[in-house]
Amino acid sequence: MFRTKRTGLVRRLWRSRAPVEGDGEADTRTHGSGGCCMGKSTKVAGKTSAGTEAELKALTHSILKKIKEKQLEGLLQAVESKGGARSPCLLLPSKVDTKLGQQSYSLPLLLYKVFRWSDLRHCSELKRLSCCESYGKINPELVCCNPHHMSRLCELGKLIIYTDHSLDSGPSSTETGGTTYSAPVGLSDSQALQESGDRSHWCVVAYWEEKTRVGRLYSVQEPSLDIFYDLPQGNGFCLGQLSSDNKSPLVQMVRTKIGYGIQLSREPDGVWAYNRSCYPIFIKSATLDNPDSRTLLVHKVFPGFSIKAFDFEKADSLQRPNDHEFTQQPRTGFTVQISFVKGWGQCYTRQFISSCPCWLEVIFNNR
């Protein structure tokens, strides 16, 4: 039988759909216990939460066949690359509802469920990425339905957190298992940038492997920055191009898992971190926690999730009179630390981030 190009695209898209939600139990082997970023055990079989697999397939095919070929190609590019390739917005009517079994879904929600998150319940669980044409628009007639222009939203009250006791250390050094290392070089370099009168950047990024900084500081002027080891398309801070002498098997293993990495974006309400990789990231930021807390918490963020990593207004108002590090190094409140794959804190053998294989220090410009 003659097969049109459109039919071929639709079939490829269906084969690339997200795994169907399983029994709803969290996979504790990978994700621990509790938290909004919990992953689901998955399987591509059986019934969905509303309607059968056959019904879902028929509904998805009928929707996709009404979409223009060029739009289907863009959607396929996004889905097959898992967001690694730059893909255009998929603008479709926002107020069209579809019905699966006894459940009604908006068109965007259904496509997000089919092609990225089968356990998604409501669009309020999502955050639109700043690269999307629909970003910041309220109730548009056409809305982007590209699932890789969205991220899952981390709620602070439900995050997996670990205590980091590094703020209990001396005023100018951090304990690292019996040894000490001076305040990060990135901090003094950042201060030098500040003092030179350079106000064009909103942050600088340093990449560290354990206690050693690798490469030069990366100064960020654009509204968003991709930090990655290996990305099919795009530009930004490529960690894979940095020269490192570290031969640690753990460091080398973690490097290979950074993959698409993270995206930092400066938005009206603060700086957001989006985990584009296939593994968790861990974040410590003064503005993520209670201002009265004596120690900062380390927050675990799973793949596909976004978290507001930094709030400029909140940072300006931070005062920790009993905190030695804040007293001696006031720029601590304008620094965020992010570790790839491996966490640190009370629940880990790594008590300090300087023991993590691959991590970032992001220093924000407060001028």
Image (cartoon, rainbow, N blue to C red):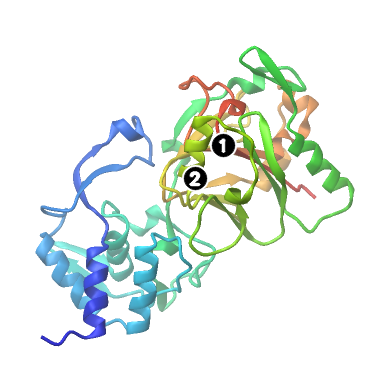
Q: Is residue 111 left or right of residue 304?
A: left
Q: Which mark is residue 358?
A: 1
Q: Which mark is residue 258?
A: 2
> Quadrant location of residue 337?
top right
Q: Residue at x 18, y 53 (%)?
A: 44
Q: Is residue 222 left or right of residue 328?
A: left
| Residue 42, image x, y percentages | 22, 46
Q: Residues within 10 Å of mark 1 (few under 14, many from 20)?
A: many
Task: Name the quarter where the N terminus is drawn.
Answer: bottom left
Q: Disc 1 or 2, which lies upstream in sequence? A: 2
Specify whether residue 322 is in view.
no
| Residue 314, image x, y percentages | 66, 42
Q: Amino acid at mark 1?
A: Cys
Q: Please say if 137 is above or below 241.
A: below
> Quadrant location of residue 102?
bottom left
Which element carries disc 1, helix, strand or loop?
loop
| Residue 194, image x, y percentages | 84, 47
